[in-house]
Structure formats: C-alpha cells, structure tokens
Image (tube, coloured by chain):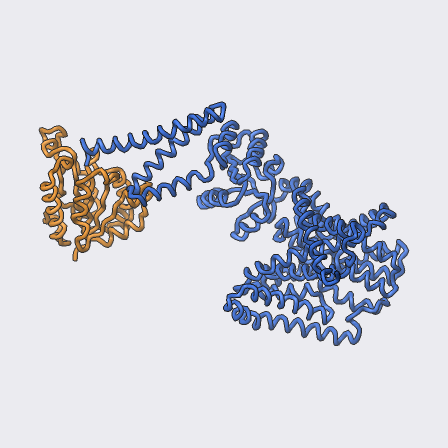
Amino acid sequence: MARILLLFVHPFPHRSRVSRALLEGVCDLPGVEVVDLYEQYPDFHIDIKAEQRRILDADLLVVQHPFYWYSAPALFKQWQDRVLEYGFAFGGEGGALRGKDWLSVVTTGQGSDAYRADGHNGHSVAELLFPFACSAHHCGMNYLEPIVVYGASRLSDEQLAGWVERYRQRLADYRPGRGQGDG
Amino acid sequence: MDEYRLLLNAILYLAATVIMVPLAKRLGLGSVLGYLGAGAVIGPWGLGLVNDVEHSRHFAEFGVVLLLFVIGLELNPKRLWSMRHAILGLGASQVALSSLLLGAILLALGFGFNAALVVAMGLSLSSTAIALQSLKERNLLATQAGSSSFAILLFQDLAVIPMLALLPLLGVPAGGWSGNPWLGALSAVAVIIAIILGGRYLTRPIFRYIAATRLREVFTAFTLLLVFGIALLMAAVGMSMALGAFLAGVLLAESEYRHELEVEIEPFKGLLMGLFFISVGMSIDFGLLRQDLFSLLALVALLVSAKGAVLLGLSRFSAIPRSQNSLFVFLLAQGGEFAFVIFEVAGGSGLLDAATTARLVVVVALSMIATPLLLLLYDHLIAPRHLRLDQPGEPEAIDARGNPVIIVGFGRFGRTLGRLLHANGVPTTILDHDPDQIEAVRRFGYKVYFGDASRHDILEAAGAAEARLLVVAFDDAELALRVIDQARKHFPHLRILSRAENNGHAYELLRRGVTLFQREYFASALELGEDALKELGFGAYRAKQAANIFKDHDRALLHELYRLETAEMRHRISLKAREELIQLLAADEEEIAHRHREGWE
C-alpha cells in the first residue's frame, strides 16, 4: 500500500470552504497521514526530527495549500527551510528523500484565465510553482503534475464535489516508484 | 495539677517559641538567638515559669541526636571516608591544643591541677547544636569552613569517650563508666559493629515492610524508634548518643528511604533543637550575672578568644580559605553541651565547689549566645567584604569575574530564566536571600549565593561592575525596586530586566527607566487562554494570532496608562481600551475573511 504524507498548509481553514472540503475528501483514504501544519506549529516552531521521520515513512508527499502571493503560506517555507535540512534532504549524507514523489495541490482565488500568458498574472500556476519543482528535484524527488483548483471562492457545490472526487481518485490511484511517467 | 505539669510545660515552651523565634528572625537575629531568648525569659532566672532546667535539657539532647542523624543521612560512607584526615588531623589538634591552652589559663586563674584538667577538657569541646544549626541555617555546610567544622565536631563526639574514661583517674567517679575499661571498650566496639551490620542489612528490609503498610505514622514511629534506640544503646556503653545516630544516618544515606526519613524527622528535630536552645537560655543565672557582670563577661571573652586563637591557627594551616577563617573561628569558639555534663559530674563529686560550677555554666551558656551574635557580625560585616576578595578557585567565593548576567532571586521564575541562559552557555551569577530556596536549588547543582541584593556592596561582590545584565526575578515588588534603585545609582551601565508583579509595579519600573519587564502571570495566562480558544474550536494559528494581538494591545495600553495621572483616568481608558480590543480582533478577522472571499482560498 502506498504511504502518503499530506501536509495541509492553511492558516485560516475556517475561512476556506474549498480547502476543508478537499482535505475531508481524502483524509480517510488508507495510507494517508494528514499533518495540519498551522494547527501543529502555530508559533512556527517545527519539530524537525518528527517531521523528518514522517516524510521518511512516506512514498508520496502531498502539499495542499492556497496560492498566497504566487506561493504557499509562510509556514510551508519554514517547513522547507527547517525540515529539508542539509545532510538529510540534500548534500553531505543527504538524499534521504531520493525516489519519493511530490504532489502540489493548490487552490487559487482567481480563475484560470488570470493564469495565462495573456492573463492578469502573465504566467500559468505550473510556471509559478517552479520553485517547488526545483526543490523536489534538488532532493532527488519526482515532481508530479500539480492539481490546481482555480477560482476556488466561486465554485458551485457540484463543481467542488467534482474536484474532491478528482483529488481522491488521484491519491487512490497513486502507486509508488512510477517516477516521472506518472500523471 | 501535677498530671498537667507536662502539658503545662509544653505549652510554655511552645508559646515562648512561637512568640520569640519569629521576632528574632524578623529582627535578622536568626532562630538560635530567638530560642535562647525565649529560654532566658521563661527560665528560673527570668519569669521563673519553668524550673526544671536539667530535665528539659536532657530531654532536648535528643534534638542534637536527631540533628546528627539527619546530617548523617546527607553524608554517605564514601564522603565520610574522604573526611578522615580532617576529622583526625584537625579534630585531634583542636581538642588537644584547646585543652592545653585552657588548662594553662585555668591554672593561672588558681584552679587545682585536676580541676583545671577536667574543666579544660569540658570547655575544649564546642556546641554541635549551635554550630551545626547555624551552618544549616546559612547553608554553609558544604563550604570548606563548614566541612572542617563538622569534622572537628565529629572528632569531639569521639573524644568524649576517652575523656569520660579519664575522669575516674582525676578523682571524679563517672556514672556509667565504672568497672573494667577494657570491657567497656569491648562493648562499645561490639555496639558499633552491631549498628553497622544492622544498618546495612536489617533496616532496609524492615523499612520496606513498613513502607508497604502505607501508614505514615508507623514509618515515623519506626524511624524515631530506630534513632532513639541506637542513641540509648550508645549511651549504655558510655558513648555519645549523637555519634550513634550519626552513624545510623550515614548507613541509611544510600537507601531509597533517605528523603522520606529526612522529612519525617525534620519537625521533631526542629522542635527538640529549639527546646535544647531554650534550656540553654534557661540556665543563664541572671542573679549571678547582675552581681558579677564584668568578670563573667571577661571570662566569656577569655574562653572564646582562647578557643578562637587555636582555631585561627588551625585554619591557617588547613585548606580553609582566608575569607572563611573568621566563620570557622566563630562557629566553634563556644563551649558545648558536654561541658554542662562534665561540670555537673565534677560539681557532684566535690572537685568543683557549687559557686564555681554555677559560674562555669553561665560562662558556657553565654559563650553559646555569643556565637549567633558573632555570626551576625560575620554575615553583615565580614562576609560581604570577602565575597570580593576571594581567590579564584575557592568553592564558596562568588566567582563572578566576567559573568555577563546577574540573576537576583532563584525561585520558579528566576530558575526558568536561568536555565534558559545556562542552556545557551551564558555564565550567570545567582543571588538569593532565602536560605531554604538556596538549599532547594543547590540540590540540583546550581551555584547560588546568599545575599541581599539591595545592598550595593553585595551587588558589587556579585560582579555588577563587569556584568552587562541584571535580572530581578524574585517576587517581592518593594525589594525589587530597592535593588533596582541601588543598581541604577551605583552601576548605571547595567541593563536591568525585571519581573513585574502587576501593572502598578510595572509603572514603578517604567518610572525608573526599566522597559524590559514581564508581568509575572501575564504570559502564562495568555497561553492558557490560547488553549481555551483552541478547545472552543479556534484553529491553533488563529488562537495564537488572537493572543498576539491581545498582547501587543495590552502592552501599548500599559504604556498609555502609565502616562496618566489618576486612577480614575486609568479606569476610564481601560474600559475604552477593552472595546477597542474587541473591534481590533474583529477587524483582523474581517480582513482575513475579505481576502479569502476576494483573492485567496
């Protein structure tokens, strides 16, 4: 069975219907361990060793977050800075995460038309997620094609249910070791 | 009335204790002087409420027995063994030299040879009760002077045996010591061996058996039974009761019941020690004192200075640091409780006449009173001076050179802060003025120095001139302000950090330019409040943000209130601020909601 570590990164989940629905849709899947980073580390003081153990135990790292300022909320950056240490994730004795998979799951406020070369932001979400792809590669991980839920604040209930189902299916279908061919 | 006699006496002793001892403590005189004073007041020469001095003193000697038991508990066999040179070397020299010097003086005063020898031997011993109580009260047992004093006192307890053996040869029939001295020595050795074997192999299973009943009073009863039993056994073979109890304590020092034993014995020990001091106070014959004040005081001075001279000489030749010389001298320069015993026996046998015996008893009692007085002198005049002069490497010197932080007060507050600094490799000098507190944290291996930080000389001794930070961490707001005033006056370069009791205290701190302060319950209350919000369904991060906003708002409010003149205005602004805070938190929440509606998800 695939082991999946899901980092849920949202400082104000009580304000995000979509984020909560997505999380609730997948958290009961077998093999999924959910870590609510803001709930666990509201003061940004991350237990580095515990988080490293968690990710070592997983085949797939899922990072689900809203798209704040073209990136993840600050605590995920803190998580990267502290948990993906030199000698653990890269460099020296590092490379503990080699061969594992990384899946970003992003919810945006604006619709997909804002994320086109001719749109308001001038870049696709996939392009803007480039630093995360580089981070994954730097750790020897396979960066899977992200799930992007556009215009999340304006989704109808049916649309949201569709996204939840797609997300759930993606995780349920996941098999470790398929590498970059997956997705 | 006779059947109530015991109860009546007990009430007298207890009432005198409750009245006098706290008073003496308040006046900074220490508990020993309080007890002595209580004794003098209720004794036959004071108000005459109690007349049976001898009887209560004999009874109270069990206090000394318990004291030595407790001290034994803190000293395992290994540490005792490491003291053997001090016990034999220092102890024997002190007893021999003091006896010789005092004997010579007594001869010069016109005593007969035998009488001079007996009295000198009696006077050469010091008061275990006074010396050890004073050491424990000041938490100085671990110092060089303290452990040397203790070694000497132990030797003196041993020396009692040959002294008692000598008495018959000097024409004094000594009570239990008639008969064959070889047989006596043999039975003494047998008793000691029995105590050692019993302590090693027998007591622990019995304690385990009794502890399993979970009846606390049975445990206490057995402990007392053990100690008193051993004491009596030792007395029966002509040895010091206290020595036997001490031996039992040492043997139990490594047992798992050590702390329980200490706790159970403590109140008995304290009360009986108190009773002992009271009985010493009672034996001061004020009539005699009035008649003959100057010659008696002169004799006390002579006794103390003769013994003191020997002790001073010894301390110069031993490992005792210079700064503790006077402590060592003052601790042991008095006459001891054994002197009373010897004088009684010698008086009874006719070697000394009644008037001389009475005078000697008063001199010894006064010399005991002199000890706490001399130690007050040490505490207030000599110790502060030496804190600064001490050589590096001395165990008790405040080794403050270069320590950037001075922490005053090492209770729960100071300790947490100190541990944080310590864990980060910041050397600190710690001062506290509560001996119990010091005792408690020393068990955890912290070096804490006794001293009143509101005196600038103590601050200076703690290295205030070179330190960068002064942390005021104790809970007496008024004293804290005094410490800060002293520090600001004499060491203006010091950055002061302070614990604040409440807003009022915080204003006083701000008035003194101290901006780095924390109100003592504020942070912890806020964190618990955060937990409460989480329990009510707030996200952890949202609760944290709410607490942070509250904290900032409250700090700003504190500074605003500080600038206001009257309590009335402060009250008004506080009420207004409470509304403001509600709006502030709501606005923050609204802003987040807005963002999530419009842009973020």
Relative to B436, residue B240 above or below = below
The answer to which of B472 and B20 lies nearer the viewer is B20
Q: In the figure, residue B77 lies in which quadrant?
A: bottom right
Q: In the figure, residue B384 lies in which quadrant?
A: top right
Relative to B576, residue B423 above or below = below
The answer to which of B17 and B478 lies nearer the viewer is B17
Give the quarter of the figure containing the C terminus of chain B: top left
Q: In the figure, residue B207 lies in which quadrant?
A: bottom right
Residue B263 image position (x, y, % from top left): 57, 58
Instruction: Determine whether, in the image, residue A140 is placed left or right of residue B478.
Output: left
For image coordinates 56% across by 65% down, the residue present is: B219
Residue B350 image position (x, y, % from top left): 88, 64
Instruction: Determine whether, in the image, residue A89 is placed left or right of residue B482.
Output: left
Chain A tint in image: orange
Residue B328 image position (x, y, % from top left): 69, 50
Give the quarter of the figure containing the N terminus of chain B: bottom right
Residue B14 image position (x, y, % from top left): 68, 53
Residue A150 visible to an observer of this rendering: yes
**Chain painted in blue in the figure:** B
Residue B128 visible to an observer of this rendering: no
Q: Residue furthest front?
A: B1
Question: How many numbered discs, if any?
Answer: 0
The answer to which of B575 and A183 lies nearer the viewer is B575
